[in-house]
Image (cartoon, rainbow, N blue to C red):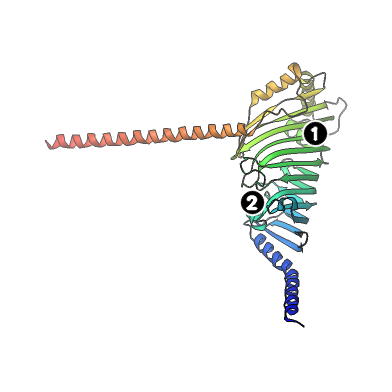
């Protein structure tokens, strides 16, 4: 056998061995990266690499809270496919696509830290950059599920979004690095527990610990009878029939936000005369008054009660304005009915304006503090001069 042939065969053998060992080393690296994420830890069961297709597949990705009481993992992704986007490669860009099949995301809200699972404690962007050092141009979720446990704690109310499908593009500013919100996002889901449907669209900057965004979101045709446990607890009423649809626009920049919620009820009925089971005297009169108020405040032509609730503030302190909300109810009933659509009047500039106003207020506050300290130092110097003057007079 010729020496050249031996060398070629040796190289082929080395490539085969490297190909066989590559998934092992990649799996070890991924699991080492996921093992310690502060309050969370992750693990991948298996990795399959397809060099010809320029792709690899993660099987059984789980991320759990380290000392949590919740049995469900924070994130479970049975199958995730990561591949090179060939059309971008031909343009000289190394760009990847990610598709997650039937993932599950489990949030839990509680004052007890061990029972609270929101992922807010971790900078996920840092681990994303370690695991995917190349640009991601497309991230798709196919038939996912998002569970929000104890979204309201008393009484407990959960929300499950099923058949969740989403697509995010240009996560790493692949197309335009100069945009403040470079990543378009679209998502849809069903809320079977409330017989409603969610539609979401946004432009976002996802590579921040607290992302910036400008979104439109709507929940449509939620059955009012499905929220009776909350209505009984907080309003001492329950619904006999009707639906509510909620439209929302929101913009947030550097944790400052501005937007609104617009709830619209249709065919709402609260009071039923011959309802006897489990209804107290107090609830009887409360429901009677509520039904009377509904009759007065609804738009008769559309059988609709609606308003627009403005929201602004910070992510930790969202404020609502009462009088505009009350005026919104009256406007819908007697002036012009709200439509089941977005107002399209919230932009990122609204959040930026709040951010600038907040910055100016803080600057004015710092200026006042500096002026106060200067006055204090001036008073101290004057007091010292007076004291020295008195000492000289005594000496004379």
Give the Cα separation between the discs numbered 1 and 2. Answer: 32 Å
Q: Are marks 1 and 2 in contact (CB under 8 Å)?
A: no
Mark 2 burial class by Cα count in 10 Å: few <14, some 14-19, many 20+: few
Q: Is residue 305 left or right of residue 312?
A: right
Q: In this view, does 35 lie above or below 386?
A: below
Residue 336: mark = none
Q: In which quarter of the image is the N terminus?
A: bottom right
| Residue at numbered disc 2 | 125
Q: In which quarter of the image is the C terminus?
A: top left
Q: What element carries label 2?
A: helix
Mark 1 burial class by Cα count in 10 Å: few <14, some 14-19, many 20+: many
**Residue reaching furthest to the bottom:** 1
| Residue at numbered disc 1 | 220
Q: In this view, does 68 lie above or below 226?
A: below
Asked if residue 292 can be seen in this view, the reply is: yes
Q: Report which quarter residue 332 is drawn in.
A: top right
Q: Identify the residue shown where x is 72% and y is 67%.
A: 22
Q: Report which quarter residue 78 is drawn in.
A: bottom right
Question: Which one is in front, 81 or 311?
Answer: 81
Give how far across and how far down residue 153 sits, in percent. 71, 42
Q: In this view, does 330 lie above or below 347?
A: above
Mark 1 or 2 closer to N-term?
A: 2
Q: In this view, does 130 lie above or below 295?
A: below
Q: Is mark 1 on a helix, strand or loop?
A: strand
Q: Report which quarter residue 82 is drawn in.
A: bottom right
Question: Which one is in front, 202 or 227?
Answer: 202
**Residue reaching furthest to the top:** 334
């Amino acid at each position: 056998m010729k020496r050249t042939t031996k060398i070629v065969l040796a190289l082929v053998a080395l490539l085969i061995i490297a190909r066989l060992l590559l998934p092992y080393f990649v799996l070890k690296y991924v699991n080492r990266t996921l093992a310690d994420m502060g309050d969370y830890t992750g693990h991948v069961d298996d990795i399959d690499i397809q060099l010809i297709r320029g792709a690899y597949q993660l099987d059984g990705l789980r991320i759990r809270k380290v000392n949590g009481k919740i049995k469900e993992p924070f994130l479970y992704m049975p199958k995730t496919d990561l591949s090179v986007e060939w059309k971008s490669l031909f343009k000289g860009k190394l760009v990847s696509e990610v598709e997650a099949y039937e993932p599950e995301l489990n949030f839990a809200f509680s004052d007890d830290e061990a029972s609270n699972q929101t992922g807010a404690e971790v900078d996920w962007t840092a681990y994303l950059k370690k695991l995917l050092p190349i640009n991601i141009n497309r991230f798709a979720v196919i038939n996912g599920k998002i569970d929000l446990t104890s979204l309201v704690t008393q009484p407990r109310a959960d929300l499950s979004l099923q058949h969740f499908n989403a697509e995010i593009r240009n996560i790493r500013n692949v197309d335009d690095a100069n945009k403040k919100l470079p990543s378009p996002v679209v998502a849809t889901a069903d809320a079977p527990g409330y017989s409603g449907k969610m539609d979401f669209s946004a432009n976002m900057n996802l590579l921040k610990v607290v992302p910036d965004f400008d979104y439109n979101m709507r929940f449509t045709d939620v059955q009012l009878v499905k929220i009776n446990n909350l209505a009984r607890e907080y309003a001492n009423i329950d619904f006999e029939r009707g639906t509510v649809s909620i439209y929302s626009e929101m913009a947030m920049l550097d944790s400052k936000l501005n937007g609104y919620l617009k709830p619209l009820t249709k065919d709402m009925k609260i009071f039923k005369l011959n309802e006897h089971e489990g209804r107290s005297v107090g609830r009887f009169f409360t429901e009677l008054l509520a039904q009377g108020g509904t009759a007065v405040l609804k738009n008769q032509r559309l059988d609709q009660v609606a308003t627009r609730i403005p929201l602004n503030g910070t992510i930790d302190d969202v404020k609502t304005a009462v009088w505009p909300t009350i005026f919104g109810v009256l406007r819908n009933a007697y002036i012009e009915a709200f439509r089941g659509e977005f107002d399209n009047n919230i932009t990122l500039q609204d959040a930026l304006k709040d951010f600038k106003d907040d910055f100016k207020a803080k600057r004015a506050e710092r200026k006042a503090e500096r002026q106060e300290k200067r006055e204090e130092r001036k008073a101290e110097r004057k007091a010292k001069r007076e004291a020295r003057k008195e000492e000289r007079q005594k000496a004379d």
